[in-house]
Amino acid sequence: MKKFFPLFLLMLLSSMGLRAQITYEDFEGGMSDLPWSAADGTYNGVIANPGPDAVNNSAYVGSYTKGAGFGYSLFWVPSLPQPLDISEYNQFKLKVWCSVATPILLKFEGPGQAVEKSATITTAGTWNELSFDMSKGFNLNNLTKIIIFFDPGNDPSNNTYYFDDLVAYKAEVCYETFEGPSNIAWTAFNGTYNGAVANPAPTPVNSSAMVASYTNNPTSDLNFAFGPSSGAPMDLTVFNQFKMNVWAPKPVKVLFKLEGAGEAKEIIKYLPVGGTWQEMTFDMSAAASFTTITKILIVFNPFKLDDSDTYYFDNICATPNYCVGAAPDPEMLDNFDCLRNATYSVGWDSLHVIKNPGPDGTNNSPKVGEWRPVEGSSYAALVITNGDVIDLSARNRFGLKVWAPKTGNLLLKIEGGQGQKEIAVPMTETNKWVEYSVDFSDQIGKGHTRLVMFFNAGVATEPGDKYYIDDIKLSAPSALPPLENFQGGVHLGWQPLDQNTALHGNFSGPTPNSNPNTVNNSTEVGCYTKGAAPLSTLQAISLSNFDLSVYPQFNIDVLSPAGGGSVRMQLSSPSAGNKEADAAISTPGQWETLSFDFSAHSGITDFQEIRLIFNAGAAAAGESWHRQPDAKQDHYRSLRRCGAGG
């Protein structure tokens, strides 16, 4: 009897580039491979094939008779030697023979997990090979039961079914491998298609014997390797994540395009490594509804002249989109699952995607990265490289989650533009997930293209060292702490404009909050009474300039008098004068948050003074902005700045 296909052997075959499959059951030699059991019907065991044919000429098959009165007559393998791994090999086939055409439901279960798919016998009295796409369960890791429901939901039926060859195939459709004939007739547009040639530099990424070769024409900025197919149009409904192996002599952009009759989809991605094979992925799920796609176009170094290099490509295959419905996250560079936006130029060959070794409250992601630094190196680097300048204008905090085996320094660095910056972060906690981040906001506009991570920087790595990493992000900073909240004192220099109390009123603070609510429940606030001038102004002076490049919006909580009105905020610049924004009161007599957007002036760098004008233009000396009519005060607190719209 065959042994249950070992997972490590499957992984080995996959890493060697072989198109492997997993046979879970074939009754070869007259014995079953799995411990089949019947709860309601009858498992008749292994028998001689009752009707060998072209679909199934095996000598032995399994037999099961459904129990009458049980719509879901349970036939199953109640306990597998190890959980099913259907992360890649999730396209299942099962051969079935029955005298009646009925549905078949294949289901995998485990504690708190399940995935199932139905198929139908189309021809009675002959062998049918049924297909079951179980890719929706690719992330499930505890599937310990195999269940087959024959004619599910039909209580009276008690048919006998013969079944054989439960096999899992890798979830991919390969359109071109250059190892033999295909339906694609490759040609060239502008450049030269050199045909299928011997692999110039086999590596574990691509050890294929034959690959395609293409040479660019230096006088053209678009050189197409063009592959029209003579076969049926590509079915992109499920298999729409295209992968391709590429060897380029230098880092380069690659354009991948699908075309049909009036339909087309193209994506440009950056290949950050030259001189070795890399696997590139192109998400064509936006073309899932296309029905006429018959052409593949590949462009190396698009829109660039003077390129006469030769490029190699191979193994163009499509896989299912496991991440249908996954919410996009513009901050995420790599979560090793559905949001893999980073391109690694250094250290990529030491980075592997694995199951999370210790999910916890900080990181319960199903998949993470495992980083195995080169032994003996004190500064083994993992480098993310962009084809274009990294935009730090809104997102400039670089960070990730780390599970470290030992204490040390996490050194995070940005480079590739004007100068560089690196920040060391102590890693003091081990064998647990910890989130780290650093501030690169002072590198805005310096043209950087690379983000670098050093784990335990400055200390030589030892045999067996490995770090788990996840959720690598370039994110926007959280809102700044309040410029002023009057808690425990005054933090800005508050005064009536030019200290003219007759025209511009009086300020006092901190004072008790006489009317707290859910908007403002602070115990202390600031108080202002208007002066005689129609533009009675309260002035606040800061010891440092306001940086509006990331935080161009100011928020302030205001308690107005019963009549309401408006508030005008001015930012004063020695070089550019006053810039202002108005906000209307909507809940007079109650605390509310008003927002003032100065994003149009984010380029001004010497704002250091805030001015507030309440009911601009209305002369109302002593006007009350408090809910108590006899109070001569105007209350506000928690002056904050945050991103536009925040």
Image: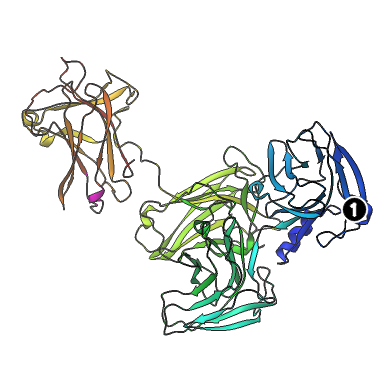
Q: Nearer the viewer, residue 591 or 117?
A: 117
| Spot occupied by residue 380 in the image (x, y as percentages of width and height) | 59, 62
Q: Nearer the viewer, residue 470 or 147?
A: 147
Q: Is residue 403 left or right of residue 293?
A: right
Q: Is residue 630 left or right of residue 27?
A: left
SS for dot 1 = loop
Q: Based on the displayed image, in which of its 4 quarters is residue 218 positioned?
A: bottom left
Q: Is residue 14 visible?
A: yes
Does the stretch in magenta take in 603?
Answer: yes
Q: Is residue 46 left or right of residue 611?
A: right
| Magenta stretch bounds | 599-608
Q: Is residue 35 visible?
A: no
Residue occupying image coordinates x 65% and y 66%: 174
- The kind of residue tagged 1 is Pro
Residue occupying image coordinates x 52% and y 68%: 271
Which quadrant would the N terminus be assigned to in this image?
A: bottom right
Q: Is residue 495 left or right of residue 58?
A: left
Q: Main secondary structure of the magenta part?
A: loop
Q: For mark 1, what is the residue?
A: 50
| Spot occupied by residue 258 in the image (x, y as percentages of width and height) | 51, 67
